[in-house]
Image (cartoon, helix red, strand yellow):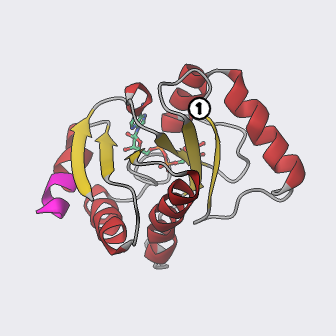
Amino acid sequence: MGITILKGDITGQRVDAIVNAANSSLLGGGGVDGAIHRAGGPAILAECRELRASRYERGLPTGQAVATTAGRLEARWVIHTVGPVYSADEDRSALLASCYRESLRVAGELGAGSVAFPAVSAGVYGWPAGSAAQIAVDAVRASATDVDDLRFVLFNDEVYAAFARALG
Ligand code: AR6
């Protein structure tokens, strides 16, 4: 598996699957979630609503992942995952690692060969960039996956630099 880091907007990536840093409601929000729904159009939200009604009446649990159409995006699928809110008192890193592992598991089920990840939890959910990057890199390296093109698409300099350090 090749791991690359890029700076920019994940919604423009030409990959099989784009991962969304969603929330449990699956009904949209700000940050990368808002950007993906805006760029992909209403088909994504429509499928999220169906998932809420069928499989996730109480919301998608933190650390899990589920796929929908990517609507008008170049990608074929959006894989929605719910990162943990950062806590200084409680170690939630296993849940953050689970987001990456579960997203790659779903990508494998779909047969996706290329996947783009944002820095899950590193925005609104408050995770410090250095720690978020290390957990992300360790988790994908530890995953048994058939994905051969894995990209981290980072939106700002600080997070990009943190991923560059974590990759070594
Ligand atoms: N492309 C790539 N990365 C982006 C983009 C983009 N277009 N936009 C923002 N980022 P966040 P979270 C970066 O807040 O912390 C939402 O409201 C951003 O700079 O999007 O997991 C959801 O609905 C940061 O580095 O996700 C949830 O309620 C990273 O993406 C909540 O925020 C993640 O920031 C999830 O919070």
Q: Relative to residue 78, is residue 43 drawn left or right?
A: right
- In the picture of the structure, the residue carrying the numbered disc 1 is 70
Which residue is depicted at the point 83% across and 59% down?
A: 58
Residue 145: image x %, image y %? 41, 65
Which residue is depicted at the point 47% across and 64% down?
A: 86
Would you say residue 82 sits in the magenta stretch? no
Above or below, 41 against 9 in this view is above
Q: Relative to residue 36, is residue 156 drawn left or right?
A: left
User: Would you say residue 84 is visible in this rendering?
Assistant: no
Residue 144: image x %, image y %? 39, 72
Q: How many marks?
A: 1
The secondary structure that dominates the magenta segment is helix
Residue 83: image x %, image y %? 53, 59
The quadrant in which the N terminus is found is bottom left
Would you say residue 164 sits in the magenta stretch? yes
The magenta segment = 163-168
User: Would you say residue 10 is visible in this rendering?
Assistant: yes
The quadrant in which the C terminus is found is bottom left
Q: Secondary structure at mark 1?
A: loop
Above or below, 3 against 37 in this view is below
Which residue is depicted at the point 36% across and 70% down?
A: 139
Callout 1 crowding tier (Cα within 10 Å): few <14, some 14–19, many ≥20: many
